[in-house]
Amino acid sequence: MQHEEQGKNLVSLPYTTATAVLHSDGTIWLEPEVLFSGPRQAFEFPQINYSRCRGKKYSFAYGLGLNHFIPDRIVKLNVQTKETWVWQEEDCYPSEPVFVPTPEATEEDDGVLLSIVVKPGADRPGVLLVLDAMKLTELARAEVNTIIPVTLHGMYKP
């Protein structure tokens, strides 16, 4: 790195507040842009419309909302405006949502989200939830009379 870059923000993207500053000792100090924040709240396992947006600027991320480390909601986050939408149901514990785009969609968020939801103590404790990814509203659910693992993580099928 050139000497004149010391003390300068090396992040050149105009749409982020994240910084990377080179110091005279050769270290680079990073400061993230906070996209989601709340007391005892977290946004984990983010997903995007990867087939359309990989390596490009995008607006929407979908994730698992945690409250005191308990996964109790699905969150859609506009990473540009920081606006959020939430799907939540009492006594339901979803897994990370998986985004499935609508074939030949023209909008980035045109598709569905799939999530395994566990409802302890219910007659049908396992549910595959299908949400409209644009509105975060329920389209369908497939209930089964068994407990299914609370994850789609790492499971990919063509």
Image (tube, rainbow, N blue to C red):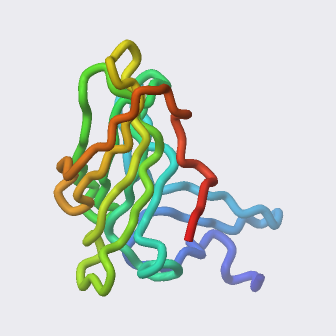
Where's residue 36, x and y in %? 37, 46
How many tags in the picture? 0
Where's residue 133, x and y in %? 26, 60
Vertical placement of 27 versus 53: above or below?
A: above
Task: Single out the residue that lies furthest toward the front.
Answer: 145
Task: Single out the residue that lies furthest toward the top.
Answer: 121
* Apparent side of residue 23 relative to residue 117 in the rendered image (left or right): right
Where's residue 72, x and y in %? 37, 29
* Apparent side of residue 100 relative to residue 135 in the rendered image (left or right): right
Identified at 40% across, 17% down, the residue is 120
Where's residue 134, x and y in %? 21, 62
Identified at 63% across, 53% down, the residue is 154
Which image quarter holds the N terminus?
Answer: bottom right
Between residues 139 and 24, which one lies in front from this camera angle? 139
Quadrant hosting residue 126: top left
Between residues 118 and 17, which one lies in front from this camera angle? 118
Which image quarter holds the C terminus?
Answer: bottom right
Identified at 39% across, 38% down, the residue is 65
Vertical placement of 144 versus 108: above or below?
A: above
Identified at 33% across, 81% down, the residue is 103
